[in-house]
Amino acid sequence: MSQTQVELAAIRRVFRLGDSEVHALRDVDLRIAAGEYVAVMGPSGSGKSTLLNIIGLLDRPDAGRLRLEGHDATTLTAQQLAHLRSRRIGFVFQSFHLVPRLSAAENIALPMVLAGLGARERAARVAEALRSFGLHDRAAHKPDELSGGQRQRVAIARATIMAPALILADEPTGNLDRATGDDVLHLLEGLNAGGVTLIVVTHDPQIGARARRRLSMQDGAIVGDTAADRLATACVGATAPAQGARG
């Protein structure tokens, strides 16, 4: 069985709005193996994005424990979290989150600038990314000069420029038409085929159906896990020598 990359134990997250409390995550337990392709699904307000932010070290839980690649993230300092996040995790958002005043090439290079990589290495990596993502003729264009699909490809190139082991995508096709969204998903799935763990938050059943494992969330809890269900079914009555596969 693959090595556990992400492990959540009794994770709880509560947001306080005035005198009221919103329980965004309720004692969530979850394990994700390296190389998995997971879709997180559920209605608006079910806790999908909060879960992604916790896994991506953008937010801290109020209770519980998070381990990422063996690191107990709940005990790390803000500086240690930033270092781990910048080198091991790539983020892709619905709204692209590109810097408007920077060109496509400069946006892609930004994580390397923040990590302190040298100019020669940055230039080589950016050139390869522009080629790989079909953006070589858009290097000098700023975000408002690019189509939605091109902006998302820039965002994916930026998310992967540091060769992360984990990509977190929050509604990555939400601002795109179906054909362009399919192209973006093919890019993400190609990275997963190369060994990168891919977690996609989506409300679209067609997108969720593409993942090999689907988590369903409701009211801050995971209420369905298709991979776990299949594994449990395969193990029932397994008295003869056999080996099961986890999809």
Image (cartoon, rainbow, N blue to C red):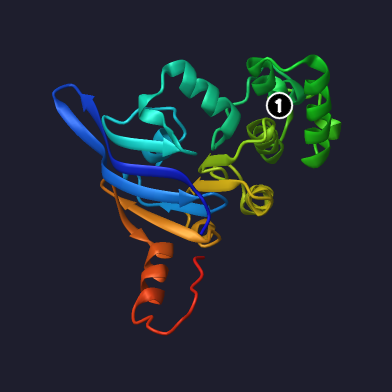
Q: Which residue is mark 1?
A: 108
Q: Which residue is at the far right? A: 137
Residue 188 position within the rendered picture, expressed as x and y whole percent measured from the top left: 64, 47
Residue 155 position within the rendered picture, expressed as x and y whole percent measured from the top left: 65, 33
Asked if residue 220 shows in the view, the reply is: no
In the image, taking residue 103 as reference, residue 236 lies left or right, namely left
Residue occupying image coordinates x 13% and y 23% = 19
In the image, taking residue 43 as reference, residue 195 lies left or right, namely right
Residue 108 position within the rendered picture, expressed as x and y whole percent measured from the top left: 71, 26
Residue occupying image coordinates x 41% and y 30% = 73
Nearer to me, 46 or 225: 225
Nearer to me, 83 or 123: 83
Q: Which residue is at the far front? A: 241
Q: From what the image shows, is residue 21 above or below residue 221?
A: above
Amino acid on which disc 1 is placed:
Ile
Q: From what the image shows, is residue 100 above or below residue 226?
A: above
Residue 184 position within the rendered picture, expressed as x and y whole percent measured from the top left: 66, 47
